[in-house]
Image (cartoon, rainbow, N blue to C red):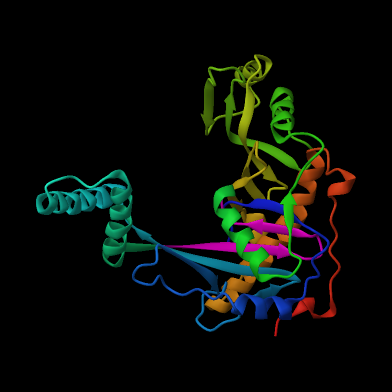
Amino acid sequence: MFKTLTLLRIAPTWQPDAAATESALAREPFTPCAPTQPLSTGWVPPRGTPHAPLLEVVGGHWLLALMAEKRLLPASVVKDRVEAIAAAIEQERGYKPGKKECKELVEQATHELLPMAFTKRSRTQVWIDPRAGLLAIDASAKQADAVVSMLVKALDCFAVKPIVTQQSAAGCMAAWLAEGEAPAGFYLDRECEVRAADETKATVRYAKHALDTDEVKQHIAAGKRPTRLALSWNERVAFVLTDALLLKKLQFLDTALEGRNVVDEDESFDADAAIATGELSRLIPELLDALGGEPQTSNVTSPITEEAGTPA
């Protein structure tokens, strides 16, 4: 269900209410791009079924999905059209358009070409754990910013901040590699990237390679710092941790998937959601503890209203 997670803390000023959230999301549904609209974003049913709820609650965890549609208009195509218009103007007037007029020609060309441009859609899964005050977005930091903006726009008093730990992810990963061992419950997998801190930015990448070797330890001793490290947790979840505290390449292992028997798409969604949120809601606190824990001021516990369990 999730491949990459950006983790954020939800401010305690927000009072989670599933019914109110469902209504708020319904005011910003996804609609395809209009002919001259470069980008359209809005909420879609996370279950993927038309007319299904925009907020699904599974085991107390909230699941949402944001759809974005973008018109693909290469700059080279716009440039060619501007040059064609400018040439026609020059032929008619006898002189080239000035700088100000050329800027207006770019807008004119873009407006003409947008209706003919192909569109590309992207769907971003969103997980909210109201009890833990956690927002997890299945996207890189840049894409996550767009989701946060939409949530802040839709929900009253909704605010988030990055998760901060007492020790940096890079520092902890370096210590684990130097020792050849991860903290209890975690295991070094077979992928990492280390980079020099000086101006050379010399980078060494390991793939499908044992990490508890003298060679890796020598890179750490020489001052290289990990930017990403593959880990597994309790033989249930495998992932790559980055120095920016992103969880990439998430994979739920066979131990976590035992007993998953489904017969249709609805059951598959519920089962996958229950497994993903259940496993990650245990993994993430243990991972943060392994990084020294969060400063006391960063701990957020959002109260749950009686309506938070089920949407309207």
**Residue 226, quarter of the rendered image:** top right
Which residue range is magenta in the image?
A: 121-140
**Which quarter shows the N terminus?**
bottom right
Q: How many marks?
A: 0
Residue 137 in view (yes/no): yes
Residue 259 in view (yes/no): no
**Residue 304, quarter of the rendered image:** bottom right
Q: Is residue 271 above or below residue 211?
A: below
Residue 264: x percent and y percent?
Answer: 53, 78
Front-lying residue, 49 or 211: 49
Residue at 77% x, 43% y is 164
Front-lying residue, 97 or 273: 97
Q: Going by the picture, which residue comes out furthest to the right?
A: 296
Task: Decide whether residue 163 is among the magenta residues.
Answer: no
Q: Is residue 174 above or below residue 189?
A: above
**Residue 165, quarter of the rendered image:** top right
Left or right: 143 with respect to 136?
A: left
Task: Decide whether residue 139 is among the magenta residues.
Answer: yes
Residue at 71% x, 64% y is 128
Residue 112: x percent and y percent?
Answer: 26, 63
Q: Overall secondary structure of the magenta stretch?
A: strand
Left or right: 217 with respect to 92?
A: right
Front-lying residue, 39 or 15: 39
**Which quarter shows the C terminus?**
bottom right
Residue 136: x percent and y percent?
Answer: 67, 57
Residue 280: x percent and y percent?
Answer: 71, 56
